[in-house]
Image (cartoon, helix red, strand yellow):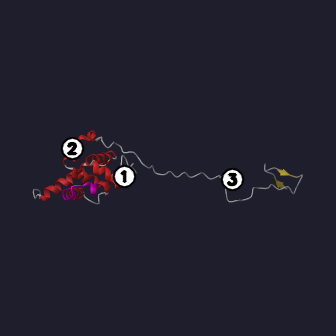
Amino acid sequence: MTKNPTNQSTSANPHHFVQEAPVTGVPINPQYPQQNYTQPPRNVPWSTGLCDCCSDLPSCCLTCWCPCITFGQIAEIVDHGSTPCGVSGALYALIGILTGCPCIYSCFYRSRMRSEYMLEDRPCNDCCLHFCCEACALCQEYRELKNRGFDMSLGTIFIFIFILKKRNTLF
């Protein structure tokens, strides 16, 4: 006795076999759940605009008067602490003094920050943005890191100690 598709016995035709679909290697009706791999988001917008400098007035003033401090703080976070704030800030100031164009150094950190956080490349590319409006670009990067939860005040303490040590007024 053979069984038909409804799993009932058939006694009328003992040679009646249920023919199954040929095996082709491609599932007709997959019984396994589909795995959905989500791609990380691309081109995430910045948390603040490029010209929103006055939304954080203290950092705006600090960046306008001493951009090396703001840059040092940004660089320390983007480097994951491997380069101290004071070293990055001093190198930024030195490049600014020697070339008159510190954006040569700072635009690379914006590019690294954008790729790490998948931020959009707007309104123009990183080097052009830093060349045309260095202070606005630094302020936007500072606000972005601050809005992502980084404590931006830590680097400032280290840079002031670095400056005071160089003047021999401390220690």
**Numbered circles on residues, count:** 3
Reading the image, the residue beneath label 1 is: 114
Indicate left or right for 24 with 9 as reference: left
72 in the magenta segment: no
Residue for badge 3: 28
Quarter of the image where one finds residue 72: bottom left
Distance of label 3 from label 1 (alpha carbons): 44 Å
Q: Is residue 27 toward the left or the right of residue 98 in the image?
A: right
Picture disc at residue 69: none
Tags 1 and 2 in contact by the CB under 8 Å rule? no
Task: Report x, y in % for residue 119.
Answer: 39, 49
Whether the magenta-drawn stretch holds residue 102 is answered as: yes
Q: Which residue is mark 2?
A: 61
- Mark 2 element type: helix
What distance separates the C-alpha of mark 1 from that of mark 2? 24 Å
Q: Is residue 31 left or right of residue 100?
A: right
Residues drawn in magenta: 94-106
Nearer to us: label 3 or label 1: 1
Q: What's the residue at 68%, 59% (across, down)?
A: 25
Q: Main secondary structure of the magenta part?
A: helix
Q: Amino acid at mark 3?
A: Ile
